[in-house]
Image (cartoon, helix red, strand yellow):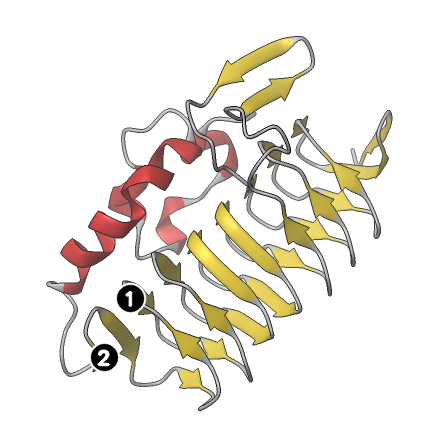
Amino acid sequence: MYKTTDLLDLSHTIAAPLFEGREYPWEALSDIKDFIYELIKTLPEDEFYSPSEGVWIAKDAKVFPSAYIAAPCIIDHGAEVRHCAFIRGSAIVGKNCVVGNSAELKNVVLFDNVQVPHYNYVGDSILGYKSHMGAGSITSNVKSDKSLVVVKNGQELIETGRKKFGAVLGDHVEVGCNSVLNPGTVIGRHTNIYPVSCVRGVIPEYSIYKAAGNIVSKK
């Protein structure tokens, strides 16, 4: 339940080739930057414009003048990047996504219809189709001791080899307001995280996370 095919529907992202053939979705994090530069070469100029080198935005996307967008970055069709959003580069913002007021993105893939609408930090992370992060919820992408991130699934430990890895949200995940997703968090499809939660490890799909040790199934 933590492999790419368990978590993500690749038909809902312009970045599908980035994930194809990868057993775990976080394996794509190291290649986002280079992938964007290659993908930019294929974008139709009648559908996208480039306000600065390495930044391509769909002509039907809405980007507020106060938003900051660093290269490389692709903003796909119908997306909305709101007031004072801070996109630090190596970011793919999918179709109909919302990147909201004071939200910060870095080295991320947002699948289509993702919402990070209010004061969110999303770094070194992948957010699946129609996932939503409530106001103030963030991904913590570096451990306090700066050691390499390990994904923990019960007693199973999966070495990622990465110093920076925030979270992977499966499709249709809902993260409650002011929650912290600790480094290496993986949340299965259709799972809800209670507000003000401190989350780590692998959380099963179709679950409600109330607190550590208190996770109930929706089924």
Q: Is residue 27 left or right of residue 167?
A: left
Q: Amino acid at mark 2?
A: Ser
- Towards the viewer: 56 or 144: 144
- Towards the viewer: 83 or 215: 83
Residue hosting label 2: 52
Q: Residue furthest bottom?
A: 65
Q: Residues within 10 Å of mark 1 (few under 14, many from 20)?
A: some
Q: Quadrant of residue 145?
A: top right
Residue hosting label 1: 71
The percent coordinates of residue 71 (x first, y second) are 28, 66
The percent coordinates of residue 25 (x first, y second) are 42, 34
- The earlier-in-sequence mark between 2 and 1 is 2
Instruction: Residue at 62%, 44% (x, y): give it.
Output: 140
Q: In which quadrant is the C terminus drawn?
A: top right
Q: Residue furthest front?
A: 145
Q: Quadrant of residue 205?
A: top right
Disc number at residue 197? none
Q: Quadrant of residue 75?
A: bottom left
- Whether residues under marks 2 and 1 lie with C-beta atoms below 8 angstroms apart, the answer is yes
Cα separation, mark 2 vs mark 1, equals 8 Å
Q: In which quadrant is the N terminus drawn?
A: top right
- Towards the viewer: 61 or 70: 70
